[in-house]
Amino acid sequence: MKKTILSLALAVIFGSSAFANPIDGEKKAIKTSESKVTWKAYKVTGSHTGTVDLKSGSLEFDGDKLVGGEFEVDMTTIANTDLEGEYKGKLEGHLKSDDFFSTASNPTSKLVFTKVKASGKNSYQVTGDLTIKGITKPVTFDVSIYGSKATATLKVDRAKYDVRYGSGSFFENLGDKTIYDEFDLVVDLQM
């Protein structure tokens, strides 16, 4: 009888301590120098492509399952890849100006995962808070993970972040000067 009570008491003590101290997931740092973020923006008369650098980032796992993530982007590194010379410099300067991303006063953007749902063996649907120009809005996108690599594709509506230049959401009669609100981000991460 004493052994049964002792065993039961130990089970309650150790069992409740397991619930009191849950095991945190493993955070894997992103190798920013080996990772790449590319963008593509669209206008009536065509499109532009470019890159922007990750400043820091990590993905969080519980075993082999993705459970979280957080990233900071260095907006001062926004670069164009489809133009050369004078036009390349002008576009990059314009993107950094207050007409677009105001990088002098908003040098970083941030993404923090708020919900991760498995959608396949190595695939996840992620919802996160994206902050651009100090404005935070939710975004939902897909992430695929293979070993030490992860990829994601996002559509971002710049109008939600008060990026107004050439936007039909803020200005009328732009004609062929219209720059569409949505732009694409393709993210290739190396852990």
Image: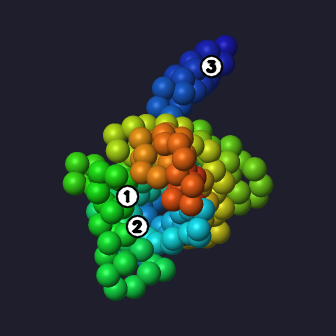
Crowd rating for badge 2 (residues with CA inside 10 Å; few <14, some 14–19, many 20+): some
| Residue picked out by circle 1 | 73
The three-letter amino acid code for the residue at tag 2 is: Val
Q: Residue at x 32, y 72 (%)?
A: 90
Q: CA distance from mark 3 to mark 2?
A: 58 Å
| Residue 144 on image: x %, y % | 66, 61
Tag of residue 50: none
Q: Is residue 137 above or below residue 187?
A: above
Q: Residue at x 49, y 42 (%)?
A: 171
- Nearest to N terminus: mark 1 or mark 3: 3
Circle 3 crowding by C-alpha within 10 Å: few under 14, some 14–19, many from 20: few
Real-space Cα separation, disc 1 to disc 3, in angstroms: 52 Å
The answer to whether residue 174 is left or right of residue 88 is right
Residue position marked by numbered label 2 in the rendering: 52
Residue identifier under label 3? 8
Q: Nearer the viewer, mark 1 or mark 3?
A: 1
Disc 1 element:
strand
Left or right of 122, for residue 180: left
Q: Earlier in the sequence, mark 1 or mark 2?
A: 2
Residue type marked 1: Val
Circle 1/circle 2 CB separation < 8 Å? yes
Circle nearer the viewer, 3 or 2: 2
Image quadrant where one finds the N terminus: top right
Nearer to me, 65 or 17: 65
Determine contact: label 3, label 2, CB under 8 Å. Answer: no
Residue 98 drawn above or below residue 90: above
